[in-house]
Image (spheres, rainbow, N blue to C red):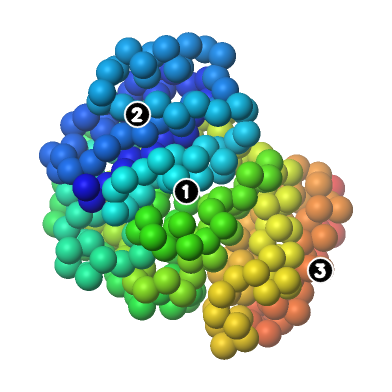
């Protein structure tokens, strides 16, 4: 089996049904589906059980999406883990594209989806399959200059490489997916899909992605892990790791200022000042203090 599709969910039964419908439309069919119910109280488990053998249900106490993904990965049988969030949608060609890139590029460790954000599914009606295009790197760290990020719900990971890490942190923070990608940073092969669009990423008020405090905590976690040498590559890859981490930090500091979280913004700025200096990020180093002065 090539893919294990892992869908963590919490109290999203209605959205989960639509997500699963997008999985059933896949024209590439060598996959299993594992739904990890994170202690839902809206009938999610009963709904999934009603689907029969099409889905394997894993239940857990309310431990968060990171723990859910880890739990699903431990139950998986596929060579690759295709993570999908329970509010997002695939297109009929999504797994076919990933399967072809895996074949074409000698089984890379990490593949990243091409996403399109939406609020209403009708916005995706005009998305069409286009010729497959990708950018290929020796590993994820080697893509540091391109600014690619691989969020959890847009990632396809070779299971053996994922299991070689500690998996996703179960701390209540954002950036747990970026932490995981950094831990897999020197695993052989990273492929970023450039076309066609392979993931519909739903924007809605219930998404923790927009929780600035969680994002601040997540970025501080990435910084702490880098300082503690938790990521692979030793000093030879430090510049690449820090280029990736600081790219996550910069928009969060600006977001903190906009929401009046000045203390958090300055904490991130100070924590990465030397890294930005070594990377020559003068526009940010000068621009952030000026913006902080003008933001009330």
13 versus 143 height, above or below: above
Mark 1, residues whose alpha carbon is within 10 Å: few (<14), some, or many (≥20)?
many
Q: Would residue 254 be visible to someone looking at this image?
A: no
Q: Residue 286: give x, y in percent of width and height.
A: 74, 73
Sequence order check: which comes first, mark 3 or mark 1?
1
Tell whether 206 sits left or right of 195: right
Q: Would residue 238 be visible to someone looking at this image?
A: yes
The residue beneath circle 2 is 56
Residue at 23%, 62% in the rendered image = 102
Please tell me in which quadrant of the rendered image residue 242 appears: bottom right
25 versus 271 height, above or below: above
Mark-to-mark CA distance, 2 and 3: 46 Å
Q: For the residue labelled by badge 2, is the local secondary structure a helix, a strand or a loop?
A: strand
Mark 3, residues whose alpha carbon is within 10 Å: few (<14), some, or many (≥20)?
few
Residue at 49%, 70% in the rendered image = 185
| Front disc: 3 or 1 | 1
Q: Residue 58: give x, y in percent of width and height.
A: 45, 29
| Front disc: 2 or 3 | 2
Q: Which mark is residue 33?
A: none
The residue beneath circle 3 is 270
Tell whether 256 sits left or right of 84: right
Q: Residue 249: give x, y in percent of width and height.
A: 66, 61
Tell whether 200 sits left or right of 42: left
| Front disc: 2 or 1 | 2
Q: For the residue labelled by badge 1, is the local secondary structure a helix, a strand or a loop?
A: helix
Sequence order check: which comes first, mark 2 or mark 1?
2
Of 202 and 50, nearer the camera is 50
Sequence order check: which comes first, mark 2 or mark 3?
2
73 versus 180 height, above or below: above
The residue beneath circle 1 is 152
Q: For the residue labelled by badge 3, is the local secondary structure a helix, a strand or a loop?
A: helix
């Amino acid at each position: 089996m090539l893919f294990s599709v892992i869908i963590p969910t919490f109290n999203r039964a209605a959205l989960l049904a639509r997500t699963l419908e997008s999985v059933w439309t896949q024209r590439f069919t060598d996959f299993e589906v594992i739904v990890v119910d994170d202690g839902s109280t809206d009938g999610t488990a009963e709904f999934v059980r009603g689907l029969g053998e099409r889905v394997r249900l894993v239940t857990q106490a309310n431990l968060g999406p990171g723990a859910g993904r880890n739990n699903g990965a431990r139950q998986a049988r596929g060579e690759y883990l295709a993570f999908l969030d329970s509010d997002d949608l695939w297109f009929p060609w999504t797994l076919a594209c990933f399967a072809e890139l895996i074949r074409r590029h000698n089984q890379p460790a990490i593949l990243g989806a091409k996403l399109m954000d939406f609020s209403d599914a009708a916005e995706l009606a005009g998305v069409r399959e286009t010729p497959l295009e990708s950018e290929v790197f020796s590993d994820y760290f080697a893509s540091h200059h391109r600014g690619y990020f691989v969020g959890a719900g847009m990632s396809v990971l070779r299971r053996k490489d994922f299991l070689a890490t500690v998996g996703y942190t179960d701390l209540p923070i954002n950036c747990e997916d970026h932490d995981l990608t950094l831990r897999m940073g020197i695993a052989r092969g990273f492929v970023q899909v450039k076309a066609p669009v392979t993931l519909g990423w739903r924007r809605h008020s219930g998404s923790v992605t927009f929780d600035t405090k969680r994002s601040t905590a997540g970025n501080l976690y990435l910084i702490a892990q880098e300082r503690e040498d938790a990521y692979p590559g030793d000093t030879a890859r430090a510049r690449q790791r820090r280029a990736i981490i600081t790219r996550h930090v910069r928009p969060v500091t600006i977001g903190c200022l906009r929401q009046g979280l000045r203390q958090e913004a300055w904490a991130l700025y100070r924590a990465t000042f030397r890294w930005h200096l070594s990377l020559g990020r003068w526009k940010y180093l000068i621009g952030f203090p000026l913006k902080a002065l003008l933001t009330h």
